[in-house]
Amino acid sequence: MTGCPNGCARPYISDIGLTGRAPGKYNLYLGGGFHGQRLNRLVLENVGEEAILEKLASVIAHYASEREASEHLGDFVVRAGYLSEQ
């Protein structure tokens, strides 16, 4: 998580990235490559903590129940289609 959109804290390559937009508002990014080979993508824009927690709880529960052996979260998010509608 970072409050700066410049990316110095590397929120755009992680499995889950959060950037602050305003007090209590964030952008949620998902799907970055574990080895840095893929940038994550914007999933929720300028939303509060409740929306982020709800989305992450759903994604992580799905990941926990259906991931393949040794599959990283970013790879699962791509395979499961969380980013396909963008």
Image: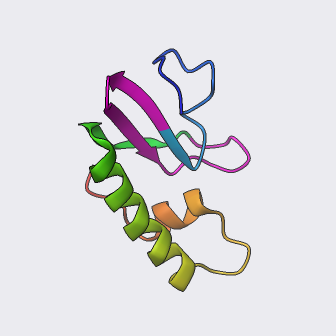
The answer to whether 58 is drawn above or below residue 28 in the figure is below
Residue 27 in sight: yes
Q: How far across and down, in percent of the image, does residue 74 sit? A: 56, 57
Residue lying at 32% horizontally and 23% vertically, measured from the top left? 23
For this view, does 35 lie left or right of residue 19?
right
Can you say which quadrant of the picture contains the N terminus? top right
For this view, does 21 lie left or right of residue 75?
left
As for residue 8 lying within the magenta part, the answer is no
Magenta-tinted stretch? 18-38
Q: How far across and down, in percent of the image, does residue 14 sit? A: 60, 43
Residue lying at 74% horizontally and 73% vertically, measured from the top left? 70
Residue lying at 71% horizontally and 80% vertically, measured from the top left? 69
The answer to whether 43 is drawn above or below residue 20 in the figure is below
The answer to whether 31 is drawn above or below residue 81 in the figure is above
Q: How far across and down, in percent of the image, does residue 32 sit? A: 56, 46
Q: In which quarter of the image is residue 53?
A: bottom left
As for residue 23 lying within the magenta part, the answer is yes
- Out of 83 and 55, give the one closest to the viewer: 55
Residue lying at 47% horizontally and 61% vertically, measured from the top left? 78
- How many numbered discs, if any? 0
